[in-house]
Amino acid sequence: MKPAPFAYYRPATIEDAVRLIADLAPHDGRVLAGGQSLVPIMAFRLARPAHLVDINRVAGLDGLVARDGKLRIGARVRHAAFHHHVADGPLGAMLRHVVRHIAHYPIRLRGTFCGSLAHADPAAEWGVVAAVMDAELVLVSTRGERRLGAQDFFRGAMETALAPDELLAEVRLPVLPEGSRFGFAEFSRRAGDYALAMALVVLRLDGGVIAAPRIGLGGAEAAPRRIDAAEAVLRGEAPGDAVFRAAAAAAAAATLPLEDPETNAQYRRELVGAMVYRALNQACAGGAVA
Amino acid sequence: MSELVDVRLTVNGTRFALRLEPRRTLLDAIRDECGLTGTHMGCEHGVCGACTVLFDGDPVRACLIFAVQAEGSLVRTVEGLANGEELHPMQRAFIAHHGVQCGFCTPGFLMLATGILEKEPDIGDEELLEVLSSNLCRCTGYQGILAAVRAALAEAREAKQ
């Protein structure tokens, strides 16, 4: 189907962009970045924005640099940027691994990291990365700039703390210390399809025991988040099958599963357990160290 | 109907000055305004890949970009692959390896594969499989397409040596 009519704006500066967004948001204006989620939704007429502010030519939003211990990802940075080396050490390796799970190659050449977070589909891979890494999100508007942690940004399925007049201009991920390990597993019915459950694990092995464990879930719940109960099971324990199974069970038990006609709560919980278990095995296996 | 906007873009080396609604996609513009119907319209929501074109060198879904966003861009479609009567190496490989059956998905696959050939000629086989899973083909079972793209990539690598 064809999208409903809208008026189109192509600002060149952040100042012009946020002024347009502020003016048009009360009149059903939306930001257009990569468009790989918004345009299909418009084609189905699930969204009928009256105004689109295209940020694809806004100067200063294309930055992708590590500075002061943080990788800063501008609003125009596309998924495909992460196919290549973007940060030293485990963070760069983790992003390069996770990006291959996002949709398909042509989609990754257009869709953006920040757009994925702003759209807040529960099955988005970058949402889990943001939650696990306690990302800092920089929101700008004509009222100024504010910064939110990922745990305060995601509110539910397609719901965030982003105000209608705000632009998610940048996301900052803390650079992981050397020796950090990661594992990532997701389950979807077809290659490139929306995940029914995914788990991202980041941890260190310190003197033979697990240190600083982070476990995040996506796809299974309305919004991505870290699972404290599962992290607590791992902390200070020697890696091994029994402790992995215990952490997986804790994550499954803590899950507040999304349900649909084909996927009941019990099935999603079991998927969560399986994904956490696989991700932990990857993270602690010899080969997974970045 | 919303206000019309002017868009200038280059498709297969030919410049077009179009005037259209912002809601018209790049796919609409290529087919209806430029008259190049080789680019096929499948699902119109980014799933099937039949409309894949090269947009400033990137293989992308033409149904997920608004034509107005292509202002000043260089677009290549399946009509731009052959050089006169001489087929592009990717087209020859699709014929040689039976990568074509009904032909509906073929223009999209050709542009996806040509994009890979130009952007990532040294792509690994596992990644190539993942990339080719981007587009749908309901006839061939993909094996002929995979063989064709592997052969075209190998030919390009040999030519470089």
Image (spheres, coloured by chain):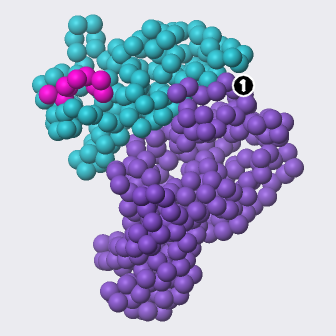
Chain colours: A purple, B cyan
Picture residue at 30% right of the left edge, 72% below the top: A287
> Is residue B62 shown left or right of residue B126?
right
Of all residues, the one furthest to the right in this rendering is A143
Displayed quadrant of residue B128: top left
Q: Which residue is found at the position 43% from the left and 82% from the top?
A: A249
Report the side of B139 relative to A202 (left or right): left
Q: Nearer the viewer, residue B146 or B55?
A: B146
Instruction: Report which residue position mark 1 lands on.
Output: A7
Q: Is residue B105 magenta?
A: yes
Quadrant that contains the N terminus of chain B: top right
Indicate the position of residue A199 as horizontal and vertical percent values. Answer: 45, 69
Q: Quadrant of residue A282?
A: bottom left
Query: Horizontal placement of B66 versus A249: left or right?
Result: right
Q: Residues within 10 Å of mark 1 (few under 14, many from 20)?
A: some
Could you tell me residue A130's position as x and y percent? Answer: 58, 63
As helix, strand or loop, the secondary structure at mark 1 comes to: strand
Instruction: Look at 19% across and 29% down and name the residue there.
Output: B99
Q: Which residues are magenta?
A: B98-106
Magenta stretch, overall SS: loop
Q: Quadrant of the C terminus of chain B?
A: top left
| Residue A11: quadrant of the picture | top right
Residue shown at 38%/61% (left/top)?
A187
The three-letter code of the residue at mark 1 reads Ala
Q: Position of residue A174 (x, y in %)?
A: 60, 67
Q: Nearer the viewer, residue A83 or A250?
A: A250
In this rendering, does residue A258 appear at all?
Answer: yes
Q: Pointer 1 indicates a residue of which chain? A: A
